[in-house]
Amino acid sequence: MATARVLNCVPSAISFDASETVTVSDKATLDALNEATAIVRRGECVAFPTETVYGLGADALQPSAVLSIFSTKGRPSDNPLIVHVSSRAMLASLLPQNYSPSPTYAKLMDAFWPGPLTLLFPADGTKVPSEVTAGHKTVGVRMPAHPVGRALIALSNTPLAAPSANSSGKPSPTRAGHVARDLVDRVPLILDGGACQVGVESTVLDGLNDDGKLRILRPGGVTVEQIQALLGQEGPEVLVHRRDFADAQLEDAPTTPGMKYRHYSPAVPVVLLRTTSPPQGTEEVSIEQIIDSMQSCDKRRVGFMALSDSTIQPPTLDNVEWHFFPLGPLAVPSVTAQRLFDGLLTLESLGVDLILVEAVPEDREGLAIMNRISKAATVTKWLKP
Ligand code: TXA
Ligand code: MG
């Protein structure tokens, strides 16, 4: 395939009315969207922005189109895809005839759609191809909030199956340039809608269990605190996978990122830095010791991703060239989320030999951030005070 074309879109030129109909007021943006729509109709993939990360989309209703997503990414075929819709009517067209969402789902959709929340629904095999669900009984669906992504779905007039637009195992792209570098000759077209505002993927929520509890399979852009605040004290219990529940079947099947396959890893070693007290028997080390132990060459280029008000001081070392990528203030984890994948991918493209990333508290967006960093990291080190 030839090199991907990158076409600029102006998000502010796109609007949706109350009946979820799209209007595009900028000619170049409309032309780009029409070009992308034609590719979707042909059954090929297009890279497009969502508010979380860039997606690699294809017509969710054409099995061969869905298969081309897997081959483009090098994705294992047993990992199900999220289906993206532009309207509630499109959601309804995917669901079993007599199914209606629970009051809790209705509340969640009213509050967080369009937005970074994926809900699991019962899958109707006559409507959603098994290539999308990887044979699971459920299908994950979300309505993206990014005007360009949502407009592409609306104009294509079909739901789009879309994983993140990266080679399997790499950090998710949050800028068109990240996609271009990774999938350059594997996609015909990348719609550029600017940097993604959320920066980590959607929260994947399973509310289909008989016990009525909500299970977060993947923490993401909608925080557990936001869900709990919406549903209130009387609302259902919200459980986070691995923190509050384990599920052998889930861990065996690759139904959430990083459980079975390697994820989010740049081509460079990533070290997670912790300043908390280490587990018993683990020695605390200095940053200099970490760098010495990771690299044997004379000159080291080291990426440093830490909070802008971090207590960690990178030492001045003769043989180290530092590349700083600040992650925003401790008090605002949404900024850290927005910058995380951008930092890993930017530092990787600068050709650093090693990336050091500071751990953050696991509240609000911090839960999703630590979920991703832990999977990206080659090793965790506890720093000497
Ligand atoms: O924000 C996002 O969710 C982005 C953008 C492009 O929308 N998409 C994304 O897709 O992150 P992907 O494929 O990289 O991650 C989706 C995860 C998969 O790892 C998959 O295991 C899980 O959601 N998933 C999808 N369908 C599922 C299902 N039926 N049951 C359980 N997990 C599911
Ligand atoms: Mg992904």
Image (cartoon, rainbow, N blue to C red):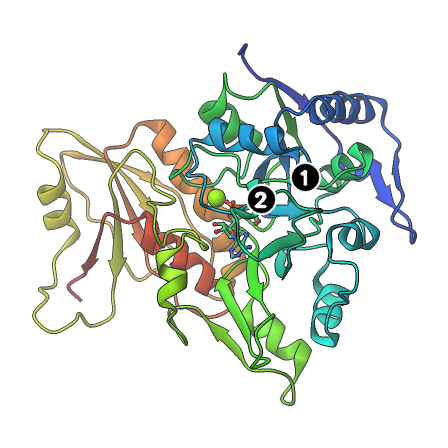
- Residue located beneath label 2 in the image: 130
At horizontal 62% and vertical 72% (from top left) the residue drawn is 227
* Circle 2: element type: helix
Q: Amino acid at mark 2?
A: Ser
Return the mark for residue 75. Answer: none
Query: Which residue is located at x 13 percent, y 55 percent?
Result: 286
Q: Position of residue 245 (x, y in %)?
A: 40, 74
> What residue type is disc 1 on?
Leu
Graded by Cα atoms within 10 Å as few (under 14), some (14 to 19) or many (20 or more), the crowding at tag 1 reads: many
| The quarter of the displayed image where residue 176 is located | top right
Disc 2 crowd, CA 10 A, few/some/many (<14, 14-19, 20+): some
* Residue 310 appears in the rendering: yes
Residue 309 showing in the rendered view:
no
Judged left or right of residue 25, residue 341 is left
Q: Position of residue 197 (x, y in %)?
A: 61, 47
Asked if disc 1 and disc 2 are in contact, CB closer than 8 Å, the reply is no
Measuring from the top left, give residue 97's x and y in whole percent: 79, 59
Ligand 1 lies under 8 Å from the Cβ of mark 1:
no
Q: Residue lying farthest front?
A: 126
